Image (cartoon, rainbow, N blue to C red):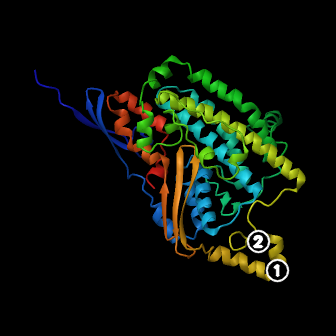
């Protein structure tokens, strides 16, 4: 009898769980994966090189398009890098707003991951539940920036503007009568903070619903328990970060270990797993959403108290970095010149190099920037978390069945905008 030969197949880019732009070359023995070779390059958009031809501030919207599920977190690292080169302080109110929106972004990211991971391996209902809450949080994005995804809300020195005092409301139309619109607008009668406070009050029950659907579901556990196991030692050696690292039991979170903004002023825990498998990484993300909800609530309380005392500024008052207010421009020619100079020429950043990193929902997202004193970066290098995770695909998939490859890709939470930048 002839010996069976291994055969090689393309997994994706058409396969839905390969997220459209990943090509995996799998060497199989029957249905068992012998080798997995991830190929990237189908989405390359040259972000790092493009940044060299744009002013420092013009590259802020490019950051949104890296990991297009964690938009403001990308902006945050980039703005922090510029601020460190400039040596400027961010107003305290802006720091709280940033932390609040970082955690909103973390929930947005994890909701999409858990929903689509479930969808990838057969839990069809999950994504319908998670998108329900995503809609509310994307309304918060829209309220501050005018955009539901690519916000470009953070700025070097703070944020674009203060939080709105009135939430946008639904209007009655031929599809929705006044009673239906009234129910939809029930949480929108006040400010953005009122809307978010209402969200934080009901979100824990929503997470309970997700857990009811998945956590003890025997099919979900059969597809995730013991699949894609990574030991703590290998997770560190492979450069894992975020839930991929914490799922293996390593207590590492930049918000605690290297605090930035006001993370040292808020109370939260770092969830960790025990077994380093797909199931533990799912549990870590569920627990992280609960912790993010706690942080958002604390930020709301502080921002409310600050507003009652007379809200402080939300961006630096240095007009070499941030534009003057319209009121100042109308009465002062010098301020008007500052405005035109900033938006035509951009800011000049002192010579130097810097690395700034944030605890992005997927892990450590870092920006390494070199300035030669000009109004554009001399070099920009991004450190996305997903690149290191994808590099471990071969090690994580080896010995598993081809169906398990889908579960492993889902647990990595890869988004190719940052990997293939």
Q: Residue 293 carries which label?
A: none
Instruction: Determine which quarter of the picture holds residue 133.
Output: top right
Residue 374: percent from the left, percent from the top?
56, 76
Residue 51 versus residue 76 in the image, above or below:
below
Q: Residues within 10 Å of mark 2 (few under 14, many from 20)?
A: some
Task: Evaluate whether residue 325 shows in this view.
Answer: yes
Q: Name the residue under label 1.
A: 332
Residue 58: percent from the left, percent from the top?
59, 67
Mark earlier in primary sequence (1, 2): 2
Q: Nearer the viewer, residue 333 or 374?
A: 374
Quadrant housing the N terminus: top left
Q: Mark 2 points at which residue?
A: 324
Query: Do tag 1 and tag 2 residues touch (Cβ < 8 Å)?
Result: yes
In the shown orientation, is residue 58 left or right of residue 263? left
In the shown orientation, is residue 99 left or right of residue 277? right
In the shown orientation, is residue 333 left or right of residue 32? right
Residue 72 versus residue 247 in the image, above or below:
below
Instruction: Determine which quarter of the picture holds residue 63.
Output: bottom right
Provide the secondary structure element on which disc 2 rests.
loop
Say which residue appears at 47% left-offset and 30% top-offset.
278
Task: Evaluate whether residue 172 shows in this view.
Answer: no
Query: How far apart, in angstroms, are the residues tagged by discs 1 and 2?
Result: 10 Å
Residue 136: percent from the left, percent from the top?
70, 40
Residue 153: percent from the left, percent from the top?
67, 57
Q: Most extreme residue toward the bottom, as rendered?
A: 333
Report how many numbered discs are placed on residues in the image. 2
Instruction: Determine which quarter of the picture holds residue 32.
Output: top left
């Amino acid at each position: 009898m002839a010996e069976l030969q291994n055969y090689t197949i393309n997994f994706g880019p058409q396969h839905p769980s390969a997220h459209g732009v990943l090509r995996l070359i799998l060497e199989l023995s029957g249905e068992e994966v012998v080798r997995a070779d991830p190929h990237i390059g189908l989405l390359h958009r040259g972000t790092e090189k493009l940044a060299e031809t744009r002013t420092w501030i013009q590259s802020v919207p490019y950051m949104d398009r890296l990991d297009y599920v964690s938009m403001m977190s990308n902006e945050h690292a980039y703005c922090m890098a510029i601020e460190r080169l400039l040596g400027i302080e961010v107003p305290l109110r802006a720091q709280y707003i940033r932390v609040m929106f970082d955690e909103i972004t973390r929930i947005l990211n994890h909701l999409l991951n858990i929903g689509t991971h479930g969808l990838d391996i057969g839990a069809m209902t999950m994504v319908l539940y998670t998108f329900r809450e995503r809609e509310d949080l994307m309304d918060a994005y829209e309220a501050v920036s005018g955009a539901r995804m690519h916000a470009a809300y953070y700025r070097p020195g703070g944020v674009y503007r203060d939080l709105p005092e009135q939430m946008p409301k639904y209007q009655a139309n031929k599809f929705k009568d006044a009673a239906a619109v009234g129910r939809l607008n029930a949480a929108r009668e006040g400010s953005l903070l009122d809307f978010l406070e209402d969200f934080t009050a009901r979100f824990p029950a929503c997470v309970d619903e997700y857990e009811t659907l998945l956590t003890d579901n025997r099919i979900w556990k059969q597809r995730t328990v013991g699949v894609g196991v990574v030991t703590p030692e290998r997770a560190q050696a492979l450069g894992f970060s975020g839930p991929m690292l914490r799922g293996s039991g390593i207590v590492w979170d930049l918000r605690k270990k290297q605090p930035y903004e006001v993370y040292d002023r808020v109370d939260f825990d770092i969830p960790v797993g025990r077994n380093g498998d797909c199931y533990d990484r799912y549990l870590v993300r569920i627990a992280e959403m609960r912790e993010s909800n706690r942080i958002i609530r604390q930020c709301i309380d502080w921002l409310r108290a600050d507003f009652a005392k007379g809200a402080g500024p939300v961006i630096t008052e240095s007009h070499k970095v941030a534009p003057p207010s319209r009121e100042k421009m109308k009465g002062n020619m010098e301020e008007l010149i500052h405005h035109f100079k900033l938006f035509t020429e951009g800011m000049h950043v002192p010579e130097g190099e810097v690395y700034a990193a944030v605890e992005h929902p997927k892990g450590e997202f870092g920006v390494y920037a070199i300035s030669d004193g000009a109004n554009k970066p001399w070099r920009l290098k991004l450190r996305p978390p997903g690149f290191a995770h994808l590099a471990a695909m071969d090690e994580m998939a080896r010995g598993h069945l081809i169906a398990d490859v889908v579960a492993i890709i889902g647990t990595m939470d890869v988004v190719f905008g940052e990997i293939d930048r």
